[in-house]
């Protein structure tokens, strides 16, 4: 500590301009405690997630709650879609309380329930939402993954959607095993053909008629995932005509049995092809490395992201695959269950290797007593470093066993210079002191003020909308991509922003974030005290790149992919 | 040694019996039989003798704690909890009942109650290393590494004073120091563990983890291979092989890394996942 001022004086004498800029950035960020205000009720967001529980401890009751932030009507304001449960054991949406719900953002931070006019109430026991423009028509479509039904809703562009699941070939029913229980899904273009493909993460073989009983007589509890056989995941290739082909076998995806939870995408080795990470419940996570020829090689073990550093599997839940230390490479964060600790892996950028970053960063110790579901790595204070938001709750009915409430308050960890993460929940707002059964979470700038907000579903409780009210947050930039050769939303594109002080920030376009949830497709950057970006490079998936220079901060930049040279 | 212990026990029982009612005496005799059967691993018979003891004296603390131990072994945590609640109520000054109750809460992830009972046990019997060891583990779960390390140090010291430190205490200490980033201190503890327990798989595995963190990938691989040759303990084959995959990857030994990864995948396939 004593040596610091001398070092600072030395460096600043050598490079006064850099030091002034750094000091300004520091001043701006030091004065910006991350803060959210919960405004769901005030905003007219009255969704209540209903898992249909009837006291029979059915496994599906634990898992629902996906939510999506998407701009379905292209008005520039992010809307919200919630997945919902169903009656048990029928697994049918027998009444409106089980409907999935679409809320239109009125662009004034109020929302209107448009479920019925949009035709997206759903069917079956829904789990997850994945939003993406699969037919490149400029309107974001919705895929709902579920226990007994998957649904593809095609956005018709007039405020209405049409269920096109069957004609698209996305029913997901296996001729031998029937419909697998799908927990998450995500859109990405694995073969860079300019059309979004669909990855569906499947959990365990489960049948309400043969649900095992667990716990002890008179004291039942939900069964452990070990009591159910695992499943393989599914990959559907987009045929460019509104239909999909199941390529799970030929791509190598189906060779790996797991208990799939959250799925996230990033080109972690920068070879131009998007890779896949799937968190698994109580068995190791899998990293599918895209070979660039339509096949994937599973290399979670070799890369060091399959297990906790001590070789133990965790009850993996949600994940995000983003550059957290600003070295240009996507790192990996994964939530788990109480006593697991959440996992954090730093991408080393060579030989496909990651290193455990949980201990050094403080995440391991700071999350040991938490059970996390969805999460997101976003720069909530726009200081140039992505922070972490965790939606938290233990399992229902566990109170009797652990002697304390199972509802938990959510948490925010602030990224301190890419070195460590500090739990700043105590000062993040009143709702971060309020426990609830938080499950899904999606992220978008719902009020278009440049600070990223969050929507969180609550098991059998009212959803929460967290408006980011961080005072003195830094400057920002957001990029709305329009692919022409690439997929329309530019999912998979990597953007590098170079600041005037020479630092480079990296992010990529994906809607697949957290657990069972889907976030806005915009690519965001916090710029700290910088009022402009010196250079912006957009690397389109599988195609060329475009460069913008001297881009003013604090607005959404629309970037249309340049035509082929 | 064993005979001397038995003689002491007989003396204690005789002394206790002099001040006890006939029912309490019957209970102690039945408990002594149950304990003998427990040591012979005849658990159903031991349990039957314990029921006899508890029928004679429902508040017999040794019988209640032994029944709790057997119940926990059979995953009947409800039965164990009832026994321990009764034992602690009957004799709050029984350090062992308090320890076991703390351990029971620890297994149930009920940290605040675990701490209360384990602290009480530690005060009642400050020379036994088990209470500080589980206090260390509880504080670890709570994310308080400093307290966890302090208690694990104490457990090691107590065991050292009583003869030699146990592998569990040393490994806990090493693991906590690793978590805290105190790699040099961790190395010292592991050297001691390797000296005392050269044939322990868990010790070699932990040493491999440390070496990998220190950047010595080849040393980590050697320690992992050593661990894999040892008979099974707490550390699983999966854990050792995962260490080996990463150590060989870092060392640039792709073929050896692939072999270990293939062994993990084969085990997964055999287990049906």
Image (cartoon, coloured by chain):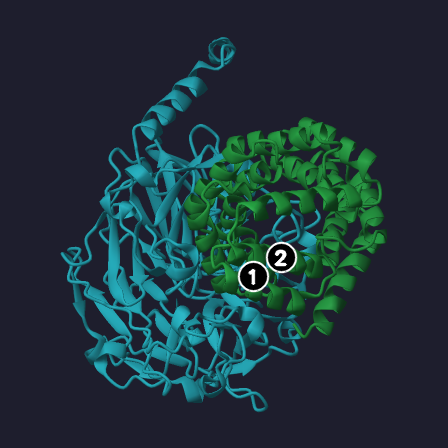
Mark 2: few/some/many CA within 10 Å (<14, 14-19, 20+): some
**Chain represented in cyan:** A
Q: Is residue B86 above or below residue A217?
A: above
- In which quadrant is the C terminus of chain B drawn? bottom right
Mark number, residue A33:
none
Q: Position of residue A328 (x, y in %)?
A: 54, 43
Residues under numbered marks 1 and 2 in contact, where contact means CB atoms less than 8 Å apart: yes
Q: Position of residue A435 (x, y in %)?
A: 30, 52
Does dot 1 land on a helix, a strand or a loop?
A: helix
- In which quadrant is the N terminus of chain B drawn? top right
Mark number, residue B29:
2
* Precedes in sequence: disc 1 or disc 2: 2
Does dot 2 land on a helix, a strand or a loop?
A: helix
Foreground pick, B66 / B16? B16
Q: Position of residue A447 (x, y in %)?
A: 22, 52
**Chain represented in green:** B
Mark number, residue B53:
1
How far apart, in angstroms, are the residues tagged by discs 1 and 2? 8 Å
Foreground pick, B82 / A39? B82
């Amino acid at each position: 500590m004593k040596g610091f001022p001398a070092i600072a004086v030395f460096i600043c004498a050598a490079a006064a301009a850099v030091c002034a800029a750094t000091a300004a950035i520091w001043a701006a960020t030091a004065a910006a405690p991350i803060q959210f205000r919960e405004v769901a009720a005030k905003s007219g967001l009255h969704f209540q997630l209903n898992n249909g529980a009837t006291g029979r401890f059915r496994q599906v009751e634990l898992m629902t709650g996906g939510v999506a932030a998407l701009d379905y009507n292209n008005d520039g304001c992010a809307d919200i879609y919630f997945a919902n449960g169903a009656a048990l054991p029928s697994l049918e949406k027998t009444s409106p309380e089980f409907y999935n719900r679409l809320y239109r953002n009125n662009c004034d931070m109020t929302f209107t329930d448009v479920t019925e006019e949009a035709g997206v109430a759903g069917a079956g026991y829904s789990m997850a939402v994945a939003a993406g423009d699969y037919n490149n028509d400029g309107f974001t479509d919705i895929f709902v993954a579920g226990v007994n039904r998957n649904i593809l809703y095609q956005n018709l562009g007039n405020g209405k959607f049409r269920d096109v699941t069957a004609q698209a070939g996305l029913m997901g029913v296996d001729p031998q095993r029937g419909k697998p229980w799908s927990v998450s899904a995500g859109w990405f273009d694995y073969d860079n053909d300019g059309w979004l493909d669909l990855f569906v993460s499947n959990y365990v073989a489960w049948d309400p008629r043969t649900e095992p009983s667990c716990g002890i007589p008179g004291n039942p509890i939900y069964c452990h995932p070990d009591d159910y056989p695992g499943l393989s995941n599914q990959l559907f290739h987009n045929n460019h005509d509104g239909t999909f082909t199941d390529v799970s076998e030929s791509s190598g995806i189906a060779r790996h049995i797991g208990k799939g939870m959250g799925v996230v995408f990033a080109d972690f080795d920068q070879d131009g092809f998007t890779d896949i990470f799937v968190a698994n419940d109580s068995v190791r996570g899998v990293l599918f490395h895209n070979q660039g020829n339509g096949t994937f090689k599973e290399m979670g073990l070799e890369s060091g992201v399959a297990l906790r550093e001590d070789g133990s599997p965790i009850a993996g839940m949600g994940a995000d695959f983003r550059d957290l230390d600003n070295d240009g490479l996507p790192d990996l964060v994964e939530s788990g269950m109480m006593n697991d600790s959440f996992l954090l892996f730093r991408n080393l950028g060579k030989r496909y290797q990651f290193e455990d970053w949980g201990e050094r960063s403080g995440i391991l110790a700071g999350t040991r007593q938490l059970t996390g579901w969805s999460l997101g790595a976003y720069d909530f204070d726009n200081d140039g470093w992505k922070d972490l938001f965790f939606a938290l709750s233990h399992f229902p009915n566990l109170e009797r066993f652990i002697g304390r409430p199972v509802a938990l308050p959510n948490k925010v960890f602030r990224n301190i210079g890419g070195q460590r993460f500090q739990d700043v929940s105590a000062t993040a707002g009143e709702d971060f002191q309020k426990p609830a059964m938080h499950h899904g979470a999606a992220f978008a700038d719902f009020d278009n003020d440049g600070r990223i907000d969050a929507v969180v579903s609550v098991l059998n409780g009212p959803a929460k909308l967290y408006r980011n009210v961080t005072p003195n947050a830094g400057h920002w930039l957001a990029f709305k991509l329009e692919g022409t050769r690439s997929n329309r939303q530019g999912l998979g594109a990597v953007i590098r922003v170079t600041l005037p002080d020479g630092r480079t920030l990296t992010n990529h376009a994906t809607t697949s974030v957290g657990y069972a949830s889907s976030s806005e497709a915009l690519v965001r950057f916090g710029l700290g005290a910088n009022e402009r970006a010196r250079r912006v490079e957009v690397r389109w998936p599988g195609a060329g790149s475009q460069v913008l220079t001297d881009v003013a901060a604090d607005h959404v930049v629309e970037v249309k992919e340049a035509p082929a040279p | 040694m064993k005979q001397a212990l038995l003689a002491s026990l007989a003396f204690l029982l005789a002394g206790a019996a002099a001040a006890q009612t006939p029912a309490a005496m019957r209970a102690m005799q039945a408990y002594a039989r149950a304990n003998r059967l427990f040591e012979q691993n005849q658990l159903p018979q031991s349990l039957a003798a314990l029921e006899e003891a508890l029928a004679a004296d429902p508040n017999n603390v040794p019988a209640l704690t032994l029944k709790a131990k057997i119940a926990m072994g059979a995953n009947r945590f409800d039965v164990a909890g009832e026994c321990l609640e009764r034992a602690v109520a009957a004799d709050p000054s029984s350090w062992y009942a308090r320890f076991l109750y703390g351990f029971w809460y620890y297994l149930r992830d009920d940290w605040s109650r675990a701490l209360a009972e384990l602290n009480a046990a530690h005060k009642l019997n400050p020379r036994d290393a088990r209470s500080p060891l589980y206090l260390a583990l509880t504080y670890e779960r709570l994310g308080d590494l400093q307290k966890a390390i302090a208690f694990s140090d104490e457990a090691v010291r107590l065991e050292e004073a009583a003869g030699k430190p146990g592998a569990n205490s040393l490994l806990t200490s090493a693991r906590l120091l690793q978590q805290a980033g105190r790699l040099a201190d961790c190395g010292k503890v592991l050297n001691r563990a390797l000296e005392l327990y050269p044939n322990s798989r868990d010790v070699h595995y932990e040493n491999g983890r440390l070496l990998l963190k220190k950047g010595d990938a080849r040393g980590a691989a050697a320690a992992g291979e050593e661990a894999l040759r040892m008979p099974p303990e707490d550390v699983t084959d999966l854990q050792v092989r995962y260490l080996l995959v990463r150590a060989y990857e870092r060392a640039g030994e792709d073929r050896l890394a692939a072999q270990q990864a293939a062994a993990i995948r084969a085990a997964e396939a055999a287990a049906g996942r």
